[in-house]
Image: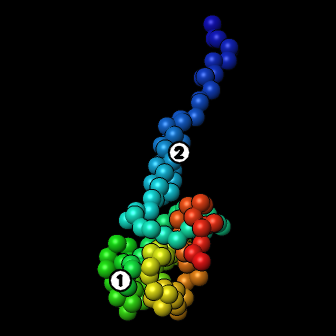
Amino acid sequence: MISFTNHSPKPASPDLTPLLDVVFILLIFFVVSTVYTAKGMNMDLPPAETSKPVSGKSMEIELKDNGKILCNMQPVTIHELAHELRAVARKPSAMQPKNILLKSVPQARVENFIRIVDTVRNEGFSNLVIVTSDKKDDVNELPR
């Protein structure tokens, strides 16, 4: 006798392995692309009451008390700094630093400080951040 019962196969469930692979790859991408820590030297920076933390990929410029300039921990002249900034400006916007951090010791000459600020602005950057210390107690003790 012929059997007319319906023998349908079990419904197929979707394979989640490719989806999990994509999720883990995206997770790794975001973890690697967002974990940037600013490395630097301990400097006696002037305090500021309105300072805020800065995050993200940054370019660091340091001004020493003897007038020496460091760009990403490498000694440069003001002309080499301008050249370095031009090279950074030519990169795609995704590869450019979110902020340009300017660290200066309190004993640095204002003339050198202003020269660096002008160089950064002349090269077309408007994301200059002046780094300060977070010593709130020192703010009330200004020199007389």
Vertical order, 129 against 17 (above or below):
below
- Callout in the foreground (2, 1): 1
Q: Position of residue 125 (x, y in %)?
A: 55, 84
* Quarter assignment of residue 6: top right
Residues 117 and 140: in front is 140
* Quarter assignment of residue 128: bottom right
116 with respect to 135 (left or right): left
* Quarter assignment of residue 86: bottom left
Query: Which amino acid, mark 1?
Result: Asn
Residue at x 51%, y 48% (from the top left corner): 27
**Residue indicated by mark 1:** 66
Q: Residues within 10 Å of mark 2 (few under 14, many from 20)?
A: few
Query: Which amino acid, mark 2?
Result: Val
CB contact under 8 Å: marks 2 and 1: no
Residue at x 59%, y 30% (from the top left corner): 13
- Secondary structure of the residue carrying tag 1 is loop
Q: Quadrant of the C terminus?
A: bottom right
**Residue indicated by mark 2:** 23
Residue at x 44%, y 62% (from the top left corner): 38
Residues 96 and 109: in front is 109
